[in-house]
Amino acid sequence: MANEKILVVDDDQNICELLRLYLVKEGYAVTVANDGEAALAAYEKDKPAMVLLDVMMPKMDGWETCRRIRKLGDTPVIMLTAKGETFDKVLGLELGADDYIVKPFDSKEVVARIKAVLRRCGDKAEGKSGVLEFDNLRLDMNSYELRIKGQVVEAPPKELELLNCLASHPNRVYTRDQLLDEVWGFEYYGDSRTIDVHVKRLREKLAGASEQWELKTVWGVGYKFEVRQ
């Protein structure tokens, strides 16, 4: 953990300084940015292990910044925002955020959440990498690459992680809450529509690939990757 880089992005300099002090005390190296454009520049330069990202910022808001970070890599992102509406939480998760903290917050809690997300992401890297192959489908979690009928299909990291979770346990039924906990890695209280949205997008990409397997809805329960015998 020592000397891992954390990028703190917030247009409130007092919040940035408070978080910087706490994180430096915990042994992290900290870079600060005060808007989305500066955040992307710092991200590409410093390659941080974690990004703390405010939502409401000048030049580029946190949603767009998160979206662009996701195109550059799978670095964990924790959203910091004064907004607590369910829609905002769902949007943050859909864009690939790993956790979500509503202001005002306790800095010790933020440090604890950072440690938990970094630990969880490390476990994922060690335990969930590998290749899954089914008829006309190849999912390589080492390179985060999905191929359908031999062709690469572009998909964001969270969609691939969701497919990996389901396809790693064929015919097992997962509830939405279980999928949120497995893929996003924290208990998410509120609207679980984000799972439905991700499944819908995956189905569009997998449509017509094979009659031997299917991403199937189990009504009243959740979803499963059904493999037909």
Image: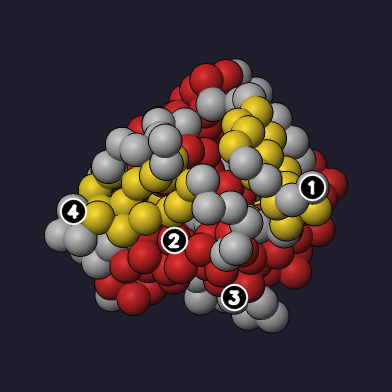
Circles 4 and 2: CB atoms closer than 8 Å? no
Circle 4: residue type = Val
In whole angstroms, how far apart are the C-alphas of marks 1 and 2?
A: 21 Å
Q: Disc 3 marks which residue?
A: 61
Q: Nearer the viewer, residue 102 or 72?
A: 72
Residue at position x 31%, y 58% in the image: 217
Circle 2: residue type = Val
Q: Disc 1 marks which residue?
A: 150
The 10 Å Cα crowd at callout 2, few under 14, some 14 to 19, many 20 or more, is some
Q: Disc 4 marks which residue?
A: 221
> Does residue 165 appear in this view?
no
Residue at position x 65%, y 28% in the image: 131
In whole angstroms, how far apart are the C-alphas of marks 3 and 1?
A: 37 Å
In this rendering, the label closer to the viewer, 3 or 2? 2
Say above or below: 158 vs 13.
Answer: above
Residue at position x 58%, y 52% in the image: 210
Circle 1: residue type = Gly
Q: Nearer the viewer, residue 55 or 12?
A: 55
Mark closest to the chain's N terminus, 4 or 1: 1
Residue 127 as seen in the image, left or right of residue 45: left
> Does residue 45 appear in this view?
yes
Residue at position x 18%, y 53% in the image: 221
In this rendering, the label closer to the viewer, 1 or 2? 1
Q: Residue furthest front?
A: 229
Q: Disc 2 marks which residue?
A: 199
